[in-house]
Image: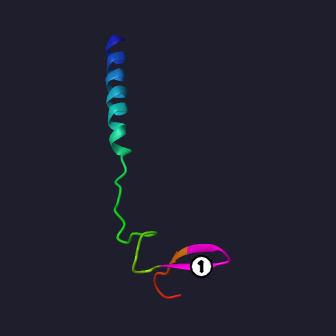
């Protein structure tokens, strides 16, 4: 009886400790800095509002 409890605890704790490794997400660095790109970013001033926009591709 004690052997089965120990075996269960070892299996459970090993699985619990290893499950954290599968949850790690890799963060990728974007190729284009959206929102901070001086080549494509422009401002439109209308009715007292200064609006920043960027255009990518052809539309």
- The residue at 59%/79% (across/down) is 45
Q: SS of the residue at dot 1?
A: strand
Bounds of the magenta span?
A: 42-51
Along the line of sight, the residue nearer the viewer: 41 or 12: 41
For residue 16, which quarter of the picture?
Answer: top left
**Could you tell me residue 43's position as x and y percent?**
53, 78
- 2 left or right, relative to 42: left
- 54 left or right, relative to 28: right
Tell me: residue 3, above or below residue 10. above
Along the line of sight, the residue nearer the viewer: 41 or 58: 41
Residue 1 part of the magenta segment: no
Along the line of sight, the residue nearer the viewer: 30 or 18: 30
Q: Name, please, the residue furthest toward the right.
A: 47
- The residue at 37%/16% (across/down) is 5
Along the line of sight, the residue nearer the viewer: 29 or 51: 51
Residue under label 1: 45
Tell me: residue 35, above or below residue 20. below
**Could you tell me residue 39's position as x and y percent?**
39, 80
The mark tally for this picture is 1
**Could you tell me residue 37's position as x and y percent?**
41, 74
- The residue at 44%/70% (across/down) is 34
């Amino acid at each position: 009886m004690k052997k089965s409890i120990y075996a269960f605890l070892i299996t459970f704790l090993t699985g619990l400790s290893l499950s954290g490794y599968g949850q790690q997400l890799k963060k990728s660095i974007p190729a284009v800095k959206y929102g901070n790109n001086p080549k494509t970013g422009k401002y439109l001033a209308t009715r007292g509002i200064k609006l920043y926009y960027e255009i990518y591709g052809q539309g």
